[in-house]
Image: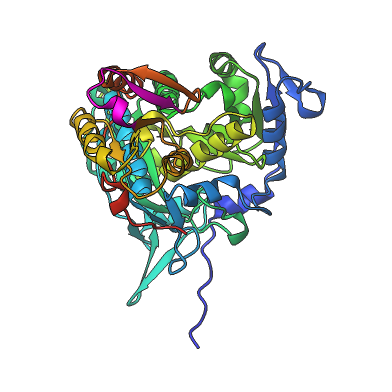
């Protein structure tokens, strides 16, 4: 029997588990209010989030609603042949994930990030990496090869920092922004914490670092990156005003930078949960995350940024300053969307909660696998349905047609179960007609409009977002069923 290898648990994670924090609500007036003194009226999600963070219990005791939705929509599913926390993506889900990946990358490139690619595994004996491994609060996957032991990356930090170490950098180059969309990052989350797409062991993480000259430059860059975060999350389909912010920092940073922290919270526009530490237990002195509260009252970070004051020196990253001396940069760590898989989880949970409020669940228009479904009344109308779908496809609209031998009502019900935004029933009256009846999912009504008007409406809703064609055959009859 082979000897069981001991799990690698970082010293930072051990320290975090023993950490004694001081918890407050920082309000818009800049006051630190102890949790038991804060009036949470009108801030119910902040109350939920605060309790979740303080308890630090990430276990899930019931199935989150998004799991049944990701399967019924044929997006994502468990893969029993893999390690828990790894998933299979069906064609529709792969399209959604790919569009999100492309969109977030486009946003980071517009911000000024320089895209790179780095390895997914690293030598555990490498002196710099071994030290950083123990400064990051995460459990690792390890791989044995001959007499060597490697760990799978849990972020893009390793490769980007090693790259920056080898670069020749001037103060004129700063802030230096390096970006990678990691496919994949790995964290050995505990089994009780794994629940659908919310917490994974393998995930796709957009990771953009900025090497900054000093704290004043880092603060300025930090605020610019917060705009990137706001724009990215809004573009995906989230209302930032409905997210909750967690701020974590050392007591010294708070004392020395109160004005900056208070102005940042005022910009966010709502009270935030503030965690203060007497001593720094990790590599950062300030960190924030924006959190989504799901249907089970669990909080999940969708974006983060951090002030890193250790790794410039640890990795030997230097820049030549104006005075001719080499110095170490402050490094900002940002994920403007969080893990791509978690964005899908949050969109599905959001749709479920809207359904509970009597609204029709939907994905954002630019992510809908089929945006328009043509439904012919009879076999004689399949040709016109196909023709209309192809015309819309030429305008970069994802349109299909249901040519199955089912009743019109059954086809409509199936299209509604797929959350298709627009349904058009085509019969004899629609042949050659200027206007067609468009069933709009958003309001549940039938609107008479020309196809050109519908195309313009969809184009307006997806403006600025990437496009992919239909992930399945245009003919519904020719599609395999992946679930059920």
Vertical placement of 77 versus 204: above or below?
below
Work out whether residue 384 can be spotted.
Answer: yes
Q: Quadrant of residue 275?
A: top right
Q: Residue furthest bottom?
A: 1
Q: Residue at x 44, y 38 (%)?
A: 412
- Count of number-bearing discs: 0
The one of 154 and 167 positioned closer to us in this rendering:
154
Residue 377's spot in the image, x, y percent? 35, 37
Position of residue 419 in the picture relative to residue 117 (left or right): right
The one of 227 and 209 positioned closer to us in this rendering:
227
Vertical placement of 223 versus 248: above or below?
above
Residue 20's spot in the image, x, y percent? 71, 42
Position of residue 53 in the picture relative to residue 445 (left or right): right
The one of 387 and 30 positioned closer to us in this rendering:
387
The one of 349 and 161 positioned closer to us in this rendering:
349
Q: Is residue 437 magenta?
A: yes
Residue range corresponding to the magenta coloring: 426-440
Q: Residue furthest top?
A: 29
């Amino acid at each position: 029997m082979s000897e069981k290898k001991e799990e690698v648990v970082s010293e930072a994670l051990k320290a975090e588990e023993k950490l004694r924090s001081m918890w407050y609500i920082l309000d818009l007036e800049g006051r630190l209010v102890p949790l038991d003194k804060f009036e949470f009226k009108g801030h119910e999600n902040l109350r939920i989030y605060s309790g979740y963070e303080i308890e630090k219990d990430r276990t899930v005791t019931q199935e989150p609603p998004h799991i049944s939705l990701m399967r019924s929509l044929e997006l994502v599913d468990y893969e029993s042949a893999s390690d828990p926390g790894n998933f299979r993506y069906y064609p529709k889900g792969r399209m959604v994930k790919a569009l999100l990946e492309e969109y977030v990358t486009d946003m980071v490139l517009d911000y000024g990030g320089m895209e790179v690619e780095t390895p997914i595994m690293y030598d555990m004996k490498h002196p710099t990496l071994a030290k950083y491994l123990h400064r990051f609060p995460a459990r690792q996957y390890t791989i044995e090869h001959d007499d060597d032991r490697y760990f799978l990356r849990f972020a893009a930090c390793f490769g980007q920092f090693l790259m920056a170490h080898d670069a020749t950098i001037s103060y004129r180059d700063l802030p230096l922004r390096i970006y990678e969309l990691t496919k994949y990052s790995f964290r050995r989350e505990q089994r009780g914490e794994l629940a659908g797409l919310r917490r994974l062991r393998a995930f796709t993480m957009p990771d953009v670092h900025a090497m900054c000259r000093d704290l004043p430059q880092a603060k300025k860059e930090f605020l610019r990156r917060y705009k990137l975060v706001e724009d990215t999350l809004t573009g995906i389909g989230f209302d930032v005003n409905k997210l909750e912010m967690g701020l974590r920092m050392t007591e010294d940073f708070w004392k020395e930078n109160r004005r900056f922290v208070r102005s940042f919270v005022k910009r966010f526009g709502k009270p935030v949960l503030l965690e203060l530490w007497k001593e720094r237990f990790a590599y950062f002195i300030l960190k924030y995350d924006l959190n989504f509260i799901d249907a089970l009252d669990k909080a999940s970070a969708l974006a983060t940024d951090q002030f890193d004051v250790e790794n410039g020196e640890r990795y030997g990253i230097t820049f030549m300053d104006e005075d001719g001396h080499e110095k170490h940069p402050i490094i900002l760590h940002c994920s403007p969307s969080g893990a791509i898989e978690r964005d899908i989880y949050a969109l599905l949970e959001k749709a479920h909660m809207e359904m509970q409020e009597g609204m029709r669940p939907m994905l954002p228009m630019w992510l809908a696998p089929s945006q328009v479904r043509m439904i012919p009344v009879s076999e004689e109308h399949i040709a016109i349905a196909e023709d209309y779908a192809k015309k819309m496809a030429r305008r970069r609209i994802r349109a299909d047609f249901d040519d199955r031998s089912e009743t019109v009502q059954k086809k409509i019900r199936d299209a509604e179960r797929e959350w298709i935004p627009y349904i058009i029933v085509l019969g004899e009256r629609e042949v050659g007609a200027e206007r067609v009846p468009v069933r709009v999912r958003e309001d549940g009504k039938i609107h008479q409009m020309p196809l050109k008007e519908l195309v313009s409406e969809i184009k307006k809703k997806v403006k600025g977002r990437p496009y992919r064609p239909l992930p399945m055959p245009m003919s519904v009859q020719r599609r395999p069923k992946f679930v059920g």
